[in-house]
Image (cartoon, rainbow, N blue to C red):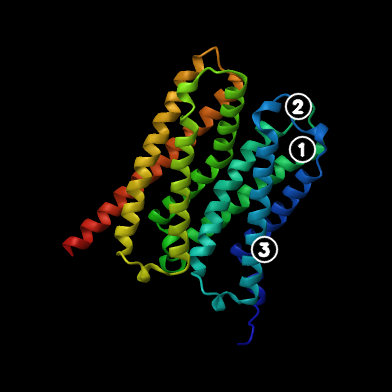
Amino acid sequence: MPVIVLEARDFTSPLFLVRTWAVLSGCTTFSLVASLDHSELNQNQPNLGQERFRIFCMFIWCFFFTLTLLIHILSVIQFHSLIPISWKNLTMTVAVLGTLMCFSASVIFPWIIMDHQKLSALSVAAAVASCLTFLAYTLESYVLCTQAHEQRGYMGSMPGLLKTLQLWGGCQMIPLVVEAVVEAIEEAVVTSTNKDASWQPWVSSISYSICILMSLVTLVVILGDFAGRCFLPFDRFLAGFSLIGVLLYMVATVICFTKILQLTDPRGLNQDKRAQLVIIETVVASITLLAYTVDFAFSIKLLCDRSHA
């Protein structure tokens, strides 16, 4: 099949420009962060898992830079028609998830990683570049959402956007759960107190892991157009996953509020560190629970509409 290159006017289209912006700003961001010296990082919060959050942010910038660059190249040479995936759902998913993940990185980097006492030009430039990357993905999502429904695909609809939000919530829990588990192990080694709460990080980890796995399975089914090959009708499949997500995140959210009540315990270690992590986890868990609840309501409505049709 011959390769068809875009016409000149396509290189000035809004979608081409915002993707170019996302690629350039993403590359600039992780290059600046990688060049930061250890002395330019935040030395006031060594116990907040600064290095783990830095790795998490670097993964976000590098991962979405790579994906966006590949999408950009495939769009230019129009090779995407030969790839056995739903291109419109892939581009929408990368744009919306990139918006959410880059927003998280733009908050985490200046809050936890940057040194607030001694601001360097590199760290400030990296923070600005991260915000510009977030803005680029936001504009790309807006451009894609303004297209016709046939061009946006399922991931551009409200249920699809909710599933992207669910995946974002699960991804945010990865560094938070790792920090909670490490903190629980360190506290158990130093003291023998708070043994009654040692199960909480593990239950939360299992709940988040199951939800991330369900989100990934759903995403693979949608991107691969495997809905017709499921042993159950796809709408029932989604409704079941949404219900499981609601139940698991209800458990996780209750555990989060229980942790908040336990912050008043003076026997615990690193209370400032624990308070910040618990508050972040509670906010993200509540947002994700709301996303699963609304998605479950959409699934029930769809099932009822089809049963009466």
Give residue 168's position: percent from left, percent from top. 51, 47
The residue drawn where x is 51% and y is 60% is 92
Give the residue at mark 3. 69
Q: Quadrant of the N terminus?
A: bottom right
Q: Do the residues labelled 3 and 1 touch (CB within 8 Å)?
A: no
Of residue 157 and residue 185, the one placed in the foreground of this image is 185
Q: Identify the mark nearer the N-term, 2 or 1.
A: 2
Of residue 217 and residue 305, the one placed in the foreground of this image is 217
Give the residue at mark 2. 43
For label 2, count other residues whose C-alpha is less than 10 Å away and answer few (under 14), some (14-19) or many (20+).
Answer: some
Q: Most extreme residue toward the left, as rendered?
A: 308
Where, by quadrant of the figure, is residue 105 drawn? top right
Q: Which mark is residue 123?
A: 1
Q: Cα distance, mark 3 to mark 2?
A: 34 Å
Where, by quadrant of the figure, is residue 139 drawn? bottom right
Q: Cα distance, mark 3 to mark 1?
A: 24 Å
Of residue 23 and residue 139, the one placed in the foreground of this image is 23
Q: Residue 283 carries which label?
A: none
For label 1, count other residues whose C-alpha is less than 10 Å away and answer few (under 14), some (14-19) or many (20+).
Answer: many
